Amino acid sequence: MTDLSATNAVTDRPGGAAITDHFAIGGYSSAESASESVREYLDSQRPATPCLALDLAVVRDRYSRLRAELPTARICYAVKANPDPRVVAELVSLGASFDVASPGEIDLCLRQGAAPESISYGNTIKKPADVAHAHRKGVRLFATDSAADLENIAENAPGSGVFCRIAVDNTGSRTPFGRKFGSSPADAALLLGRAGDLGLDPRGVSFHLGSQQLSTEAWEHGVAAAAETFRAFDPGSGPRMLNLGGGLPATYTQPTPDLAEYTGTVRATLRRHFGEQPPELLVEPGRYLVGDAGVLRSEVVLVSEDTTGRGRWVYLDAGRYNGLAETEGEAITYRLRTSRDGDPVGPVVLAGPTCDGDDVLYQHTVYELPTTLRGGDKLDVLSAGAYTASYSSVCFNGFDPLTTYCFDSAETTERA
């Protein structure tokens, strides 16, 4: 596989300017070098496609960078981003905490050695039986955003700590949450007051600014809204924890600010709204920790000319149902590399292998790939460590779920 110094061009709309790769988010030492370590592994091992390979050294690097930028924050890895047990075990060894959404994720973390007190049950939508399961396992911190859920927690996890999720402006996110989660700051104050009446510990307030958040200023909205809830209580008598949620990005085709720009905004905003005594901080990174650590390797199944004049259709053995669900609405536009990079390029429509008309990856975002591409060639989807294997279907159309291979490039370097 050739090593491209230039990128395959991609634009968000026909006729638009090409977006070039941008690696400011920081990394191993960049998203490009992180991807190269994984592609070298794939080239040497030659696993069957489609598959995801992930470098644990990159996960460590991202965790260390975030720890250095927010040294007092509790870092809770959002397990849903990539629940591979080897990823969880690596983060356990680093001292991470965990943001979970189900009993299955709780049990996964515990099996990999996570302490129950390191687990935050961050899903506001949960059955009473799920709350009881978490409590039996030793989990003592729960998210909520409704009276009904709060009652379930009080009944099935007595004495636990709760934090109330508020709804905030998700502008700048490539995959916003819409209206599904969160209460108003005023209602959050009422819920936290009610939590105390029910014998629970009204621990704090949380928000989430949407996944792949590209605006550093978004945290201003979230912290300001949370501060409104804090002000509803007398000093020292109300919430004492602020959960900043997730949203830190991986590196796709859109430029991303440096991590220090995000954390600098967070620190400045905390000073503005909380003075010199900020609350206890939590942060829930998922995509940031694992996204750039992974490469999804696929194979071109066939290339077909479109007689309507739209150019070539390139069909891959990876599609919406076996790893690339985040291409829905073309919200996430991945960087791509092929085994024929360096050859002349032309526009393509990219699609998956299934008998479903929705299994089309990119037809509005214009990708230009080598005109020499043919069946059997390899196509790598870069920065694909997050929300690929975890979104893969069980067996749609008989296609297997995405296989994940984890390795540690630092160990390989030491042996060499």
Image (cartoon, rainbow, N blue to C red):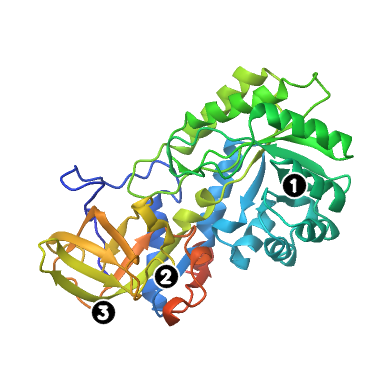
Determine the residue positioned at 67% across, 17% down.
275
Q: Which residue is mark 3?
A: 376
Horizontally, residue 363 falls left or right of residue 308, namely: right
Q: Position of residue 403 (x, y in %)?
A: 49, 74
Rounded to the nearest angstrom, the CA distance separating label 3 from label 1 is: 51 Å
Q: Quadrant of residue 224?
A: top right
Q: Can I make out residue 171 in this image?
A: yes
Q: Which residue is mark 1?
A: 149
- Would residue 413 be visible to someone looking at this image? no
Q: Tell me what residue is drawn at x 58 percent, y 48 percent.
A: 63
Regarding mark 3 in the picture, which secondary structure is present there? loop
First-in-chain label (3 vs 1): 1
Residue 341 lies, in percent from the top left, at 21, 64
Check disc 3 and give the amino acid type: Gly
Label 2 secondary element? helix
For the residue marked with disc 1, what is the amino acid?
Answer: Asp
Q: Residues within 10 Å of mark 1 (few under 14, many from 20)?
A: some
Q: Secondary structure at mark 1?
A: helix
Q: Position of residue 276 (x, y in %)?
A: 69, 18
Residue pictured at 53% horizontal, 38% vertical: 209
> On the rendered structure, is 145 left or right of 298?
right
> Which quadrant of the rendered structure holds the N terminus?
bottom left
Q: Nearer the viewer, residue 241 or 87?
A: 241
Tell me the quarter of the picture where residue 207 sits.
top right
Look at mark 2 in the image and give the residue it sits on. Answer: 41
Does residue 165 appear to the left or right of 47 in the view shown?
Answer: right
Q: Residue at x 40, y 72 (%)?
A: 42
Q: How far apart are labels 3 and 2 at the CA level?
A: 19 Å
- Tag of residue 133: none
